[in-house]
Each structure stands twice: as C-alpha cells, then as structure tokens.
Amino acid sequence: MTTPSAWITTWQTLAVAGVSTKSYPPLSLTNVRLPAVFPVNWSVNRVLSGGDDIAIGGCAADDYAVEYAVTMYLPTEAVSQSNQETNYTALGAIVDAFKASLDAVDVVAAIEYTLDVGATVEVAGSLYWGVIAEIKGRNE
C-alpha cells in the first residue's frame, strides 16, 4: 500500500521525454524550459471498498480503500505567442510521451486518468497552451 508522501513524490518527479519536471506549481514560467509538467493539487480519500454490499457501522479496517487524486499541468507555450496551429500540432508528440510516462507509474495498483489536450493552463496569471491531467489511483 502506498502512502500520501509516496503518491505526491511520484508526480513531483515524473519524467516525461522532452518535458522539464517541476516539483510544485511555479510562481512564473519565465525561467522554466517549456514544455513543463508539475502537480497543481492533490487529495487523499478513505472510502468503503465494498460499495453497497457493506453495512454502514459494521465495517472492518480492511473494508476501506484509499483513493488518491492529483491534477497535473503541462503548459507548452504562452497563448499570447499566437502560434495556435503549431502548438496544437506539437501536442500530439507531447501527449504520447506524457501517456507513456503515466502508463509506467506503479505507485498504486492502478491509475486512471483524463488528459484535457489543447486546454489553456493558467500559471501566475498568464495563459499557456497545454494539457490538464486529472489522475486517480486506488489502494485496496
């Protein structure tokens, strides 16, 4: 079973080919090589693992699972650069590399994720083309 610190450390150190990794949301991307990837927020939830089959009040310690979630931003270039077509096209290779890294994560038994590609990512009040990833994992 993983721990909360192992969960967030996984995302703070996630290696994605051709992308720089930041361990926290930067205050600015002025001095950061783009594209970059970093965790924005994360959560840990204790939930019933048996669903409706377990009567409330009669739960043993092993009737619970721990669910983890993290939101990752992967900004590629400032929207103000007006290179929409170039940036949109470049996202294909970036998403391939990001997906390969996500598929290799083994901090929990399995993860699921949604990648919002072509999203605008806000960092320090500036908008960037990029990807927003919503990632969930569960220990049972």
Image (cartoon, rainbow, N blue to C red):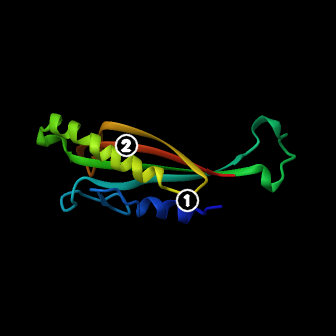
Q: Quadrant of residue 49?
A: top right
User: In the rendered structure, which disc, 2 or 1, sits on the residue that comes first in sequence?
Assistant: 1
Q: Residue furthest right?
A: 58
Q: Which residue is labeled 1 in the image?
A: 107
Callout 1 crowding tier (Cα within 10 Å): few <14, some 14–19, many ≥20: some
Contact between marks 2 and 1 (CB within 8 A): the answer is: no
Q: Quadrant of residue 22?
A: bottom left
The amino acid type of the residue labelled 1 equals Val
User: What is the x, y in percent for residue 80?
Assistant: 14, 41
User: What is the x, y in percent for residue 95?
Assistant: 33, 44
**Residue drawn at x 41%, y 53% as measured from the top left:** 101
Q: Which residue is labeled 2 in the image?
A: 132
Which one is nearer the viewer's eye here, 15 or 9? 15
Which one is nearer the viewer's eye here, 71 or 99? 99
Marker disc for residue 89: none
**Residue drawn at x 23%, y 44% as measured from the top left:** 128
The amino acid type of the residue labelled 2 equals Ile
Q: How many marks?
A: 2
Q: CA distance from mark 2 to mark 1?
A: 20 Å
**Residue drawn at x 18%, y 58% as measured from the top left:** 30
User: What is the x, y in percent for residue 82?
Assistant: 12, 38
In the displayed structure image, the side of residue 81 where residue 26 appears, left or right: right
Q: Is residue 98 above or below residue 120?
A: below
Assign a secondary structure to mark 2. Answer: strand
> What is the quadrant of the N terminus in the image?
bottom right
Q: Quadrant of residue 29?
A: bottom left
Callout 2 crowding tier (Cα within 10 Å): few <14, some 14–19, many ≥20: many
In the displayed structure image, the side of residue 89 where residue 2 appears, left or right: right
User: What is the x, y in percent for residue 91?
Assistant: 26, 41
Assign a secondary structure to mark 1. Answer: loop
